[in-house]
Image (spheres, coloured by chain):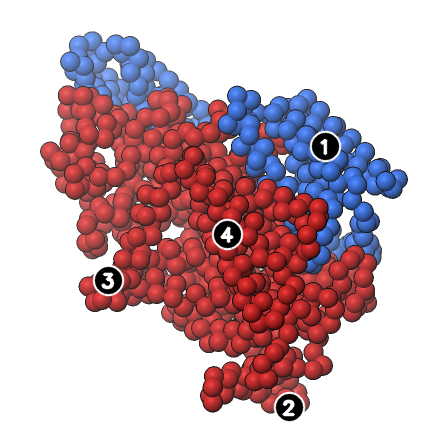
Chain colours: A blue, B red
């Protein structure tokens, strides 16, 4: 057993242990959690690349593909095992299971011979080109994502809804835009006859108001939305079927 | 060495030719560090080449982003930028593979970079979430697994999806590990799978051809297949299954060259692990893999008759793959048979009816109901040209593959390529177009190989391979003059690659779906809008999940994927459930549909009345019994529910209205 190989194995196992702990400790959508999760997810690939049988795949690209495929397959089968048993697929079981896969592949690959030939180190020019390429891709995705978000925001607008609330109802007015909007609500069929009221709804806010109803007849609700005195779209119409 | 195992025994076969760079005539390196000239390539300038190509591709990716932004704003230049940048991505990599002298690592790196660059085209167009029809179906399965930690929840969007959960399992696992959303996790998994696919394709083509140059260009040609740019980049089980299948094929081929022993058994175990994951990921791909494994056995037996003795037939892998696929079918996924029957039977019977004259053949590009949704003339021409180009190349590529017939991989890929023309017959029927398109990811394994062989042969010999059939002999030599004529052939090869790529995209993907833009009626991905997502999110938040809803095609997908509602489809008696929306008033049959299907809510998108549907129908293909729409659906058909006793209009955002019909159904 060569010393560099043992060091590789220890490194893989240490990384697996640290990444598992980080996944379990850090909350979602934090940088340490994301990094740990990505590292833990990729470790089976690194461990599989050390397997003797993978080293037998002497085709160019074959080892890379074979180790990747074996890693992906192991994660699929881990997921299958967890979901069909009482354990279930959760944060904890995924993390521990992946770490166990890394452990198993590392131990099996410990006895393999041969050394990994690292790729040639890029020259300073090559490194600069790579950095420029990565920065360009990041900018590209930022530009595309920004435009998509703008488009989505413009696509959101105003909505009105009515829900039963025991014998009465609740009227919801949603303003998903970035400007305050005034909702003029005309409600017919209430115990007070037809009444009209105007409410301001702040940007990206929802207002709920009760609508009391006496009798069993249906309610007819008409909502007109305006921003700075200018009407926005057609009136929104709601109705309830009434109670028997 | 393994590269020399195939031999040309018949004197009538033309030799490959002397003085070529083709590694087929030289022993290949079988251990790391070996330095045969072809395996390592020249070291000079080897590092700056890949970073330089990286930067070039990155600039094309930026151009794609700008095209997507321009398309959202309705800018007319966006289409031109789109085509120029996507073609530039492919041509840069093709040119380097053909005309530079990259090392093996650089060739593989180029193929991987191209796969990632082309993947970014789809991500840049829709970077906020899954929007394709199939993606939304698999999103529901992934969500159910994420929430419950277990399998086999019913999926109203695609009932078979929960029974082949491979993609969703690994996506949910990654989401749990990383804390990312299901969208980011799914996109990452598909991206990683494409990287693995790219490398596996290179290995497969290298194994079959014995040439790094052929492997590089064949992998590029493969990526010109109609489904690679969009369909295979989507979050759907087929996209994840294909890389597993190609990896399994690569492992199988390697095992076939190995002698008996513990290493052989170890490789068998690895192949079995990958095949097991494939079986739980996609039905057809796992069946096809089993078929390919058996076909490899046949190729080995044939090769032995011709004098080859260095390959072992992979019976164990073939039997294991078949047994695993059948076992999964019977144990878990018996729904697969009716599902595949409903997909394949109309396609096959449609072709038979066209051949027998019972049905008129479908015209190409005939589904576009409006000029805005139709491909322009130059794209249609390119699409036809790409098909003709492939058909023209196949015989010559087949000759080159035949010369390698003692290599089972070459023989198998050649046989797959010959299915290209019969599969195109499915395009004669409306039902068969989808099947023909989706089969391209398999057929192009062979097509890419044969065309790659031919391109390299042309460049090295400046002549087509000689076809000899008895006394008939065909050959064509390109005169090698000075100046322009020396450059003409390489340029012609690159132009052919561009035609294949552009034509392939045009054949499969409708023009309105390539780039984002304004809401398009009945336009699948272009019908996915924030309003629709907001409406179904509201349903989930205020009405709870799993309500039975009836709505149009795209809103139904959104309701299932994001709103977690149960989208109802199908028929009542001989009426499509869509009849509820396409009738002028709520007729007795519509009330019967609502009651029999136990509909609780209707989601009505009044924007449908603005235009004809891009796909030709709004709700379901059977909504008008094959009668095409001449005018948009009247708004009154969609808003007739407002005055129906027992029906409440409970949500309105100016475009989308939600009706509570439980009172009507119960009465």
Density class for disc 3 (Cα within 10 Å; few <14, some 14-19, many ≥20) is some
Q: Which residue is mark 3?
A: B353
- Report the residue that reaches farthest toward the left: B588
| Mark-to-mark CA distance, 2 and 1 | 62 Å
Q: Label 2 is found on which chain of the structure?
A: B
Give the quarter of the image for residue B154. top left
- Answer yes or no: is residue B650 visible: yes
Q: Which residue is mark 2?
A: B481
- Between discs 3 and 4, the one toward the N terminus: 4
- Between discs 2 and 4, the one toward the N terminus: 4
Q: Mark 3, mark 2: which one is toward the viewer?
A: 3
Residue at horizontal 52%, vertical 24%? A85
| Mark-to-mark CA distance, 2 and 4 | 47 Å
- Report the residue that reaches farthest toward the right: A3
| Mark-to-mark CA distance, 3 and 2 | 52 Å
Give the quarter of the image for residue B450. bottom right
Assess whether mark 1 and mark 3 are in contact (beta carbons under 8 angstroms): no
Query: Residue B289: which disc?
Result: 4
Position of the N terminus of chain B, as image quadrant, is: bottom right
Q: Height in image: B529 above or below A87?
A: below
Helix, strand or loop status at disc 4? helix
Position of the C terminus of chain B, as image quadrant, is: top left
Q: Residue B592: x and y, percent?
A: 15, 31
Same subunit, tags 4 and 1:
no
Same subunit, tags 3 and 1:
no
């Amino acid at each position: 057993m060569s010393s560099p190989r043992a060091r590789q194995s220890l490194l893989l196992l240490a990384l697996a242990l640290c990444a598992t702990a980080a996944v379990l400790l850090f909350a979602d959508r934090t940088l340490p959690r994301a990094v740990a999760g990505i590292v833990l997810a990729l470790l089976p690939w690194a461990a599989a690349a050390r397997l003797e049988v993978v080293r037998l795949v002497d085709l160019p690209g074959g080892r890379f593909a074979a180790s990747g495929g074996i890693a992906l397959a192991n994660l699929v089968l881990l997921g299958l095992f967890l979901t069909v048993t009482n354990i279930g697929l959760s944060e904890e079981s995924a993390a521990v299971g992946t770490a166990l896969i890394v452990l198993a592949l590392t131990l099996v690959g410990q006895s393999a011979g041969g050394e990994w030939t690292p790729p040639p180190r890029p020259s300073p020019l090559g490194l600069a080109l790579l950095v420029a390429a990565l920065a360009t891709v990041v900018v590209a995705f930022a530009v595309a994502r920004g435009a998509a978000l703008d488009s989505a925001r413009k696509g959101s607008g105003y909505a009105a809804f009515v829900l039963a609330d025991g014998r009465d109802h609740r009227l919801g007015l949603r303003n998903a835009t970035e400007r305050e909007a005034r909702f003029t609500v005309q409600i017919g069929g209430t115990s007070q006859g037809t009444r009209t009221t105007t409410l301001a709804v702040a940007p990206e806010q929802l207002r709920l108001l009760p609508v009391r109803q006496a009798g069993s007849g249906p309610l007819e609700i008409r909502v007109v939305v305006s921003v700075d005195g200018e009407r926005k779209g057609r009136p929104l119409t709601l109705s309830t079927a009434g109670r028997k | 060495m393994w590269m020399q195992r195939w031999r040309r025994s018949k004197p009538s076969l033309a030799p490959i030719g002397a003085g070529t760079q083709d590694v087929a005539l030289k022993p290949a390196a079988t251990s790391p560090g070996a330095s045969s000239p072809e395996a390592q390539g020249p070291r000079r300038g080897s590092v700056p080449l890949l970073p330089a190509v990286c930067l070039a591709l990155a600039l094309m990716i930026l151009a794609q982003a700008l095209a997507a932004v321009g398309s959202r704003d309705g800018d007319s230049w966006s289409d031109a930028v789109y085509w120029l940048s996507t073609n530039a991505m492919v041509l840069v990599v093709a040119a380097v593979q053909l005309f530079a002298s990259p090392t093996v690592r650089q060739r593989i790196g180029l193929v991987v970079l191209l796969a990632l660059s082309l993947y970014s085209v789809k991500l840049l167009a829709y970077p906020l979430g899954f929007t394709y029809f199939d993606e939304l179906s698999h999103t529901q399965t992934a969500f159910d697994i994420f929430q419950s930690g277990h399998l086999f929840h019913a999926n109203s969007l695609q009932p078979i999806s929960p029974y082949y959960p491979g993609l969703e399992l690994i996506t949910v696992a990654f989401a749990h590990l990383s804390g990312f959303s299901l969208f980011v996790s799914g996109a990452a998994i598909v991206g990683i799978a494409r990287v693995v696919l790219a490398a596996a394709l290179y290995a497969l083509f290298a194994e079959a051809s014995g040439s790094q140059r052929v492997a590089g260009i064949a992998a590029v040609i493969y990526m010109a297949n109609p489904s690679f740019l969009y369909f295979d980049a989507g979050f759907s089980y087929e996209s994840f299954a294909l890389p597993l299948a190609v990896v399994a094929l690569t492992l199988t081929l390697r095992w076939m060259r190995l002698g008996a022993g513990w290493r052989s058994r170890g490789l068998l175990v690895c192949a079995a692990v990958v095949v097991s994951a494939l079986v739980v990921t996609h039905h057809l791909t796992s069946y096809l893999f089993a078929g390919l494994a058996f076909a490899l056995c046949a190729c080995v037996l044939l090769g032995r008759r011709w004098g080859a003795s260095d390959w072992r037939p992979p019976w164990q892998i073939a039997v294991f793959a078949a047994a695993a696929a059948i076992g999964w079918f019977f144990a878990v996924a018996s729904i697969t048979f009716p599902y595949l029957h409903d997909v394949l039977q109309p396609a096959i019977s449609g072709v038979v009816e066209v051949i027998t004259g019972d049905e008129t053949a479908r015209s190409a590009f005939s589904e576009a109901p409006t000029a805005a949704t139709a491909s322009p003339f130059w794209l249609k021409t390119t699409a036809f040209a790409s098909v003709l180009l492939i058909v023209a190349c196949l015989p010559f590529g087949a000759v080159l593959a035949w010369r390698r017939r003692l290599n089972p991989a070459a023989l198998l890929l050649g046989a797959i390529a010959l299915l290209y023309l019969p599969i195109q017959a499915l395009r004669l029927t409306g039902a068969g177009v989808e099947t023909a398109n989706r089969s391209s990811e398999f057929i192009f394994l062979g097509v890419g190989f044969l065309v790659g062989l031919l391109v390299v042969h042309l460049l090295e010999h400046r002549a087509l391979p000689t076809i000899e059939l008895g006394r008939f002999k065909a050959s064509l030599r390109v005169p090698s003059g000075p100046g322009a004529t020396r450059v003409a052939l390489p340029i012609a090869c690159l132009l052919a690659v561009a035609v294949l790529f552009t034509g392939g995209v045009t054949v499969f993907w409708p023009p309105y779906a390539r780039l984002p833009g304004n809401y398009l009626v009945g336009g699948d991905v272009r019908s996915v809008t924030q309003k629709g997502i907001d409406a179904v999110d509201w349903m989930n938040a205020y009405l709870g999940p799993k309500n039975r809803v009836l709505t149009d095609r795209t809103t139904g997908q959104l309701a299932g994927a994001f709103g977690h509602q149960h989208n109802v489809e199908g028929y009542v008696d001989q009426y499509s459930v869509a009849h509820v929306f396409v009738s002028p008033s709520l007729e007795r049959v519509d009330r019967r549909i609502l009651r029999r299907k136990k509909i609780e809510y209707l989601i009505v998108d009044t924007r449908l009345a603005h235009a004809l549907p891009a796909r030709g129908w709004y709700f379901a293909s059977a909504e008008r019994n094959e009668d095409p729409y001449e005018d948009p659906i009247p708004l009154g058909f969609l808003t007739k529910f407002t005055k129906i006793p027992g029906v409440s209009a409970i949500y309105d955002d100016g475009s989308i209205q939600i009706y509570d019909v439980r009172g009507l159904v119960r009465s």
